[in-house]
Image (cartoon, coloured by chain):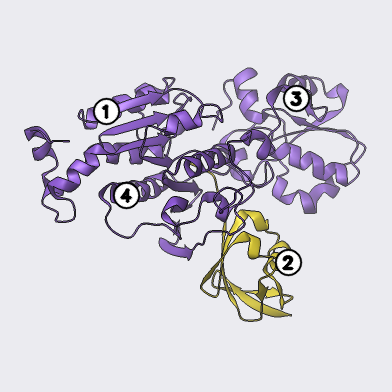
Chain colours: A purple, B yellow
């Protein structure tokens, strides 16, 4: 692995660092990194790694760029909306450093393809946004003995660590052996995230990748670094390998990849469509258009969200207040509940049913589906 | 009721009890948190046996998945 004159000029600030030097820069160039997810975390990771001289970056993402991504996913620009994230990422990375080979995997990582995807790379970086993919990434990395550079974010807080049981540290399952029940931990789409936050956590992940490539410094192995942007504080927790870990202990019970959707309690789509507790936005429109049907529609989102977008004539009763305020409702009245995407309204429905309400339905897809299918003037957020 | 120091704040708790029982009483999912007990890492499989006492220091972090 040699550096040409252009590369020597480009990496001069690395080359004069005693910890990097020519030998280190060659190691960086020889390193192949697979970035799972080209979103909030994947953006700064891929961009800084390319700039720093990583020789090959693989990008796995099946998604397309949405307007709501641009607040933090700096790989993508306004002009990329609607394009494949992997394609857009490749263009940005090549613009930063044409010496970097970019391989795009415009596909959803799954138990069927994960081992083949990861095998050709030295380091995996987890920039995904959901539990099934995080467990899948972890398990595949443990099985293949690849370091898994972990980061995750929510609202104003982030976490980072390096999982590498083959180097003596714990894996993701040593921290979180089982996923939380579906709907218990909100996603960034539901709970929000500060635009800069993935930049900070992603840069920490990128730092660890360069250190792994160089074989220098103290890695975040056996440590969980936590960041709180509101307090602007970092703290750190010690981690240990769980002697009962199902995948990285000496005689593991998990020896191959499993079905991660099922493991995370996610019901496949076809079964989802027939949920008797759900109605469609078209049903909601009929209820609003025909007061004689005597169906009341209630918005269970939070007041801040109601201010951003609302459906005319629908009153607000936030899920967070339902516990104290459900007595304002009539248990014999027919209600349709809606939220942003249909998750919280199902929670509200279950709560009201426990309180003896008989005729409650949840609007599938929430106000987002209303905006898409009924009234485009309602902003989608 | 006695208390422990969780993430720097005093929290009333029916101690002594196991870490598992404490977490459930705090409405936390024991399989979805990372815990450091008096500066020491605790693996999830040890939560049911790990006893916590009045004044103990706990650092508790909840799982998040955003990216």
The residue labelled by disc 4 is A212
Residue B65 point in image, percent of width and height: 54, 44
Q: Badge 3 local density, few (<14 within 10 Å), some, or many (20+)? A: few
For the residues tagged 4 and 1, is the chain the same? yes
| Disc nearest the viewer among 4 and 2 | 4
Q: Residue at x 71, y 78 (%)?
A: B16
Q: Residue at x 25, y 27 (%)?
A: A94
Q: Secondary structure at mark 4?
A: helix
| Disc nearest the viewer among 3 and 4 | 4
Q: Tag 4 or tag 3, which sits nearer the N-term?
A: 4
For the residues tagged 3 and 1, is the chain the same? yes
Q: Badge 1 local density, few (<14 within 10 Å), some, or many (20+)? A: some
A78 with respect to A228 (left or right): left
Q: Which chain contains the residue that carries disc 1?
A: A
The answer to whether any part of residue A142 appears in the image is: yes
Residue A165 point in image, percent of width and height: 47, 52
Q: Residue A19's image quarter?
A: bottom left
Does A19 sit above or below residue A64? below
How far apart are the alpha carbons under marks 4 and 2? 39 Å
The residue labelled by disc 2 is B21
The residue labelled by disc 1 is A101
The residue labelled by disc 3 is A271
The answer to whether any part of residue A72 appears in the image is: no
Q: Which chain contains the residue that carries disc 3?
A: A
Q: Tag 1 or tag 4, which sits nearer the N-term?
A: 1
| Disc nearest the viewer among 3 and 1 | 1
| Disc nearest the viewer among 4 and 1 | 4
């Amino acid at each position: 692995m040699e550096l040409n004159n252009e590369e020597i000029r480009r990496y001069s600030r690395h080359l004069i660092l005693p910890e990097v030097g020519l030998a280190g820069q060659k190691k960086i160039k020889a390193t192949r990194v697979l970035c799972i997810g080209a979103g909030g975390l994947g953006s700064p990771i891929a961009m800084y790694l390319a700039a720093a001289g990583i020789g090959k970056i693989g990008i796995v993402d099946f998604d397309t760029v949405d307007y709501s991504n641009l607040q933090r996913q700096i790989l993508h620009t306004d002009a990329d909306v609607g394009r494949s994230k992997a394609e857009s990422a490749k263009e940005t990375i090549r613009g930063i450093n044409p010496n970097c080979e970019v391989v795009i995997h415009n596909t959803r990582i799954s138990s069927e393809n994960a081992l083949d995807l990861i095998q050709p790379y030295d380091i995996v970086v987890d920039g995904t946004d959901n539990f099934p993919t995080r467990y899948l990434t972890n398990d595949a990395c443990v099985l293949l003995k690849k370091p898994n550079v972990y980061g995750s974010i929510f609202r104003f807080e982030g976490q980072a660590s390096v999982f590498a049981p083959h180097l003596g540290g714990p894996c993701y399952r040593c921290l979180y052996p089982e996923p939380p029940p579906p709907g218990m931990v909100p996603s960034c789409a539901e709970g929000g995230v500060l635009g800069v936050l993935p930049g900070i956590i992603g840069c920490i992940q990128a730092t660890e990748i360069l250190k792994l490539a160089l074989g220098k410094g103290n890695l975040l192995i056996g440590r969980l670094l936590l960041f709180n942007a509101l307090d602007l504080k970092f703290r750190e927790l010690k981690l240990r390998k769980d002697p009962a870990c199902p995948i990285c202990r000496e005689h593991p019970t998990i020896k191959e990849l499993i079905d991660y959707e099922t493991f995370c309690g996610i019901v496949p789509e076809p079964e989802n469509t027939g949920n008797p507790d759900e109605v469609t936005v078209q049903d909601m429109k009929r209820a609003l258009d025909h007061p004689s049907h005597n169906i009341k529609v209630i918005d269970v989102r939070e007041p801040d969200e109601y201010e951003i977008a609302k459906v005319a004539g629908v009153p607000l009763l936030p899920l967070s207040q339902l516990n104290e305020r459900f007595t304002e409702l009539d248990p014999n009245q027919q209600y349709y509940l809606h939220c942003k995407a249909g998750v919280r309204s199902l929670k509200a429905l279950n709560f009201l049913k426990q309180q003896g309400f008989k005729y409650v339905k949840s609007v599938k897809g929430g106000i987002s589906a209303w905006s898409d299918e009924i009234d485009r003037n309602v902003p989608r957020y | 009721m006695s208390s422990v120091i969780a993430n720097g704040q005093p929290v009333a708790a029916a101690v002594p009890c196991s870490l598992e029982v404490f977490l459930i009483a705090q409405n936390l999912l024991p399989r979805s948190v990372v815990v450091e007990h008096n500066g020491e890492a605790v693996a999830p499989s040890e939560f049911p046996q790990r006893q916590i006492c009045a004044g103990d220091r706990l650092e508790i972090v909840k799982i998040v998945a955003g990216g």
